[in-house]
Structures are given as C-alpha cells and as structure tokens.
Image (tube, rainbow, N blue to C red):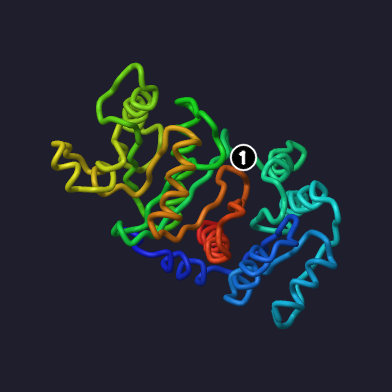
Amino acid sequence: MALKKLSSLVEIARKKPAKRLIVAAAEDEQVFIAAMKARDEGMVTPIFVGDREKIEALAAGLSTGSPKPEIIDSKEKANSCDIACQHISEGKADIIMKGLVNSDLFLKSLLNKKYGLVKDSIISHLAIFETPFYGKLLGVTDAAMNISPSLRDKAGIMRNAVRAFHKLGVACPKVAVLAATEKVNPKIRATVHASKLKMMNTRKKIGNCIIEGPLALDNAISKAAAIHKGIENEVAGDADILLVPDLNSGNILYKSLNFLGGAVSAAILLGASVPAVLTSRSDSDQCKFMSIVFAVAIN
C-alpha cells in the first residue's frame, strides 16, 4: 500500500484510542495549538509540563474550550524534560513532545539511562513529506539526530524507518540510499555504505524492505531520470524512504522540501520506548500537529 497524502496518517490516527501526550516546556504557542488541535480531533489527551502561568495564558488567549488541559507546573526547562520522561518511564504517558526548550536539554533527559526509554541501538529522526512534485509520501532519514553515521548506525536508522512504515501499512517499503553518484567510489563513503547496506538487506539483516543504492536524488524520485541514466530497479523513481549520507545533507534536503518544494511534513524520533515529537522551531503549527498525528499513527 502506498501512502499518498498526510491525511492518510490522520485517518490511521483517528481509528486508534486516544494517546496520552506529554509536552516538555509547553509554554510555546505553536506547540500548544498543535497539541490542542490533536486533542479536539480525539487523538490525544495532552499533559503540559512547564510554566503554569504562561501555559494558562496561552489557553485563555486561544479560547481552547473545556475541559481545561492538565498542567504540571515547572519553571526550569531541564526539570520539565525530566518530569516528562519520568511520566513516560512510569507508564503515565504514551508520546513525548519537545516544547520551548533546546533540543540538547530535551535529548539529555530522553537518553538518560535512569528513565530507561532507549530500547534500540540508535535514536533516529524520520520525516515524512507530502509534496506536489511526488506522487506519494516520502520519508527522509536522518535529518536531525545523527551527525556522521557509521555503516552500523545507518543500518539502525534504516531499521527504525522501515518499522515505522510497516506500522503505517506499507508492507515492503522501497529505500533509496542516497549519494552523489550511482557508482561505488571508495573515496565517497556514502557509496560504499550504500553497497554494503544493500548486501545486508539481501541477508535479511534490515527488515522487510527493498534497498537500492547508491542512488542520486534524481534517480531515487524520478523514473524519467533513472531511465535516462539506464538505471532499472524496483526503487529507482519510486522510493518510499530516502536514507541520507549525514546530518548536513539531510537537514538541507528537509528544509529544501519545506521551504522551496512546497511540502508539508511530519517528523518524529524513533528508537525510544515511545515516539518522540521533535520539531524545528521554524516548523509551522500544522507541521507540529501532523507530527503528533504521525506519532499516534505508529504507536
């Protein structure tokens, strides 16, 4: 099954019981709007951790209606993150979300061993884009977490993304391992990694997916470009997931799709015991809402 629109995630999320969403440092207007919209859609029951006065002012100013959301007062950002992670650890919440706090502080709590939230070998970021220039949803990983991933890291990043697509109903996602060229060049690490990842998948070490690479971006998403270059495989021109070489290239691709490509996106962190919503400060409240929806849909 191919997912065409982000509205498909909304449909999946609406069929699930409401999840308990806990937001760390929730005194952020766009995050608050997104969480309350998800509540009004019946997808989540939000718990806001942060400065009570500021959160209550947001609620009053936005006329969020009744009942009033649960608020846990915490003036310190780091403490808000710790409280949120403790709630997840104790089974009091199902999804965690970053609010008005630096990612470093949020991740420090999320990765703290005392909370026991990291279940896999690697935490990775997965964004899903709906763009008018592609015929289905497109996953990009990892654009925000792993700076210069090793081959082992990339295998873990890919497993996380493939599992997420499985939960969305895509039984065998097509993964393109991106590089600057389609040929293996020992001087370009991304091409070597691509070749090895493809080999690992033939040995059933990744999951139920189809992996091809190295592929340049044009060949991964354009059938015409692939045919023009004589590239014929199941992934070329029809990728579901793009595995980027490193954080720099992933971040540039992420922001290019959003700010130049007219895309709408949803993004979460994978690899912890629950999905973590980690959006950019420049993301819209719609993107933040869709990211919550994404987390609910795979939970």
Q: Quadrant of residue 136?
A: bottom left
Q: Residue at x 54, y 68 (%)?
A: 16
Q: Quadrant of residue 104?
A: top right
Q: Quadrant of residue 225?
A: top left
The residue labelled by disc 1 is 119
Which residue reaches farthest top? Answer: 186
For the C terminus, which image quadrant? bottom right
Q: Which is nearer the eye, 47 or 60?
A: 60
Where residue 87 appears, as percent x and y from the top left, is: 76, 54
Q: Which is nearer the eye, 58 or 231?
A: 58
The answer to whether residue 107 is left or right of residue 216 is: right
Where residue 54 appears, as percent x and y from the top left, is: 81, 66
Q: Amino acid at mark 1?
A: Lys
For the N terminus, which image quadrant? bottom left
Where residue 288 appears, as percent x and y from the top left, is: 57, 61
Where residue 181 appears, as percent x and y from the top left, is: 28, 30
Q: Crowding at label 1, few (<14), some or many (≥20) Cα neighbours within 10 Å? A: few
**Residue 82 seen in render:** yes
Under tag 1, what secondary structure? Answer: loop
Q: Residue at x 33, y 62 (%)?
A: 132
The answer to whether residue 284 is left or right of residue 84 is: left
